[in-house]
Image (cartoon, rainbow, N blue to C red):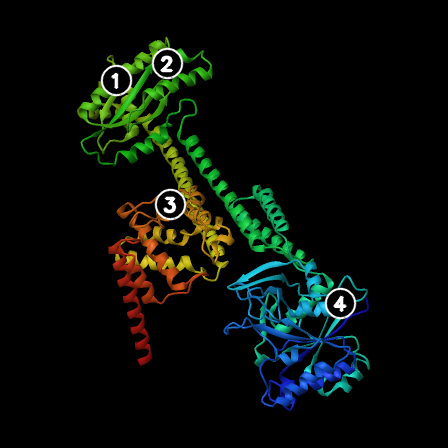
Amino acid sequence: MPKLKIYAVGIDDESISKIESIYPFRRSIYAKLLKTLNEEKVKVVAFDLVFRGKSQDPTEDTTFAQAIKQITDTKVILAFMFNYYGSDSFILPEPEFQNNPNCVLGLVDVPTDKDGVSRRLFAYVNTNTNTNTNIFPNSAYSLSLQLAATTLGVSAEKLVKFIPLVPYRAGKIMASSFFINYLVKPTIMQTADLPPFSSPTVVKRIRFYDLYANLEKLKKLLGEDFLKDSIVFIYPDAEVLHDTVITPLGKWPGGYLHLNGFLNIISQKFLVKSKLLTLLGALVCCGLVLYLSPIGGLGIQLIITCGVLILGFWYSIIFRFMGIELSFAIIALSILTFSLFILLYKYLRYLVALAEIKHKVSQDPVRGLYTLRYFCYYFDFVAQRFYFGRKLYCIFILFESLKDELQDMPLASIRRIWQMIRQTLQIKGSFWAVYSSEAVVGAIPASKQEFSHMLEVLSASLRMLFEEKALKVKVKICYLLWHREYRIRQVLAILFDRINSQTTPISTVDEESLNILQKRFISETQLEQQFLELLDADLEEKNRQLLNVIEELKKEQIRNQEIFFEVILSLVNALEARDPYTQGHSTRVMHYALSLADRLGWSKQEKEKLRKAALLHDLGKIGIPDSILHKKERLTDEEYDFIKKHEIIAIRILEPLKGMADILPWILYHHERWDGKGYPHGLGGDAIPQAAQILALADVYDALTTGRDYKKALSVEEALAEIERAKGIQFNPALADTFIQMIRQNIISYTKGLNTQSQT
């Protein structure tokens, strides 16, 4: 097939100013141009103009109609469009123009997506229910399809079978469309490779005025026969004509979308959306995140996620150049979600490691009791508490001869013996530590009567244990009633000295005896005490170091929780950004909820929890498909049941974060109703947490005032009237009254502020 010559003839500002006719031009001007193009043997002339209505001068219409009839070798395509306001389905050219064998009609309307961007063109529109059935019995074909069919000399019905069609429905419009592969851009000259042809197709952009009035000059520049067998596409190009369309590549003249659609069809180089390659890209990117995740910690993981997001973006760009469109939004959401789960997994591992560190530092590995250092620290902390009706007792238990009895036993048997001892020592509120291989120390908060009984039971149980194991161990217990002025290390040394000399199974050290023992103990061991104090100071320093490490780990845990919150919040923002109606919804709900909490006198801590709950209340919608989430028609029962699961999905995502435990019920129940007819559990009245009731009010109010795909936004007073009607049915009446009062007062305050500024 020979090279196609395409001329994009734009009616630009210069053409409008130079031609001796106020726009819209007289139809005799188009008739003169059409006659010239026929003489130059142009193959096809397509008008992206709708010649509707009668001219004031009837001769203008007659001249244009005769020009169409008199052409011989040139085919003419005239535009028509939807009639959005009239009774007829389409706005058509005058009958005297269209009723001609040399003329066909093409639809010039361009569909737009919800974000206002045009990514596809109509192939044809179903017309079975239209009023213009005498002209379009079954289908009304688009301008780009008619241009391609006329150029190739085939019928539009036949050619449409080779187009990858996508259904399109908007209101009463039922059509088939195809995605645009932008092969040419609105520049002075653009070349696009079209595989079926032996040479490239050239699109040259020239002015309407030059073609109309300066044809000879154009022939000198482009050749005497530059128009022969060419395709001339005439379209509005001036900004004042308002025929511009927003495309993924920027704002373009509408005619260039039809030119690209025409080139897509004749070259069979369409833009195809592939769900399989999108899924493959998401899996590869998630696999890469998983493979690189062991490299480092939280910061490195975030860098890896950003890097893989960039790779996913270029993956989609490469396929875009190949004519295959991938959903980068799905790939990005998959990467972020998978990275989130990896971060959650690392966070849980961090908590487990922290627990293991605490266990190794604070517990004896063989006996499973606290180490003596940790016991002394913890005892000093516990001793500062105030016990209602109870006292704190310090206990020293000596297992005489236990070391000798266990000397020849294997380690596993020794551990089993100590496990049974530990289980016997498990008294409510008590804690124990290893003092030596034959002694343990502990603390028990109890009343005097309870404590006496506990000691008898404890002594008897320990003796019975050793008898059952055939161990010749004598159990001695020494205790004292604790006073705050005592020093635990000194008291333990005194109890150890006392228990070694006692002859009874249970003995106590009263306050008077303790004072005597302290004086004797200090005088007899003064030199040893100095050494112990030095050792104690060293132990204290190491203990402080341990506490500093624990404190830093706690701070790191809080920081990690905040980072996880920010990552989850970014997912919510990404989810809302997919729909212009819901963008910023969670932030607005947060402001309404916090304002109402202020009215109710909530504390700063509770309001911080409410802030997080409001920002994350719709997190679960990340698991709802777009086809359900943004559906304009009424949802089926199955789809509505799917929507009801979004709170449960949010809870499952947030459950691993312990810092979120308090707000989980608030998120879970924010769709419950006061009359008990909500979901997911049908709670009613005050059984619904107050925070969930606040979120429900804020959520509904924002939905009413911002609108959705399927309904218009209400005014503030209309929205408040809806809430008023739902009092006692959907909302807590008292909370609803407070919310309505708050909104109205905020509006009055805002109005007063504007008046003050204007007066100033």
Q: Amino acid at mark 4?
A: Leu
Q: Is residue 298 above or below residue 719?
A: above
Regarding residue 741, the answer to whether it shows in the image is yes
In three-dimensional space, the C-alpha distance between marks 3 and 1, rounded to whole angstroms, equals: 51 Å
Q: Quadrant of residue 551?
A: top left
- Tell me if label 3 and label 1 are in contact, CB under 8 Å: no
Q: Which residue is mark 2?
A: 402
The disc, 4 or 1, on the residue closer to the chain's N-terminal end is 4
Q: Residues within 10 Å of mark 1 (few under 14, many from 20)?
A: few
Residue for badge 3? 680
Q: Secondary structure at mark 4?
A: helix
Judged left or right of residue 309, residue 514 is: left
Mark 3 against mark 4, which lies toward the viewer? 4
Give the alpha-carbon distance from disc 3 to disc 2, as whole Å: 60 Å
Where residue 132 sits: x, y (%)? 58, 71
Q: Residue 392 appears at what percent x and percent y?
A: 23, 29
Earlier in the chain: of badge 2 and badge 4, it is 4
Q: Which residue is mark 4?
A: 152
Near-viewer residue (519 or 626): 626
Name the residue type under label 3.
Pro
Q: Amino acid at mark 2?
A: Leu
Quarter location, residue 260 = bottom right
Give the numbered dot on residue 457.
1
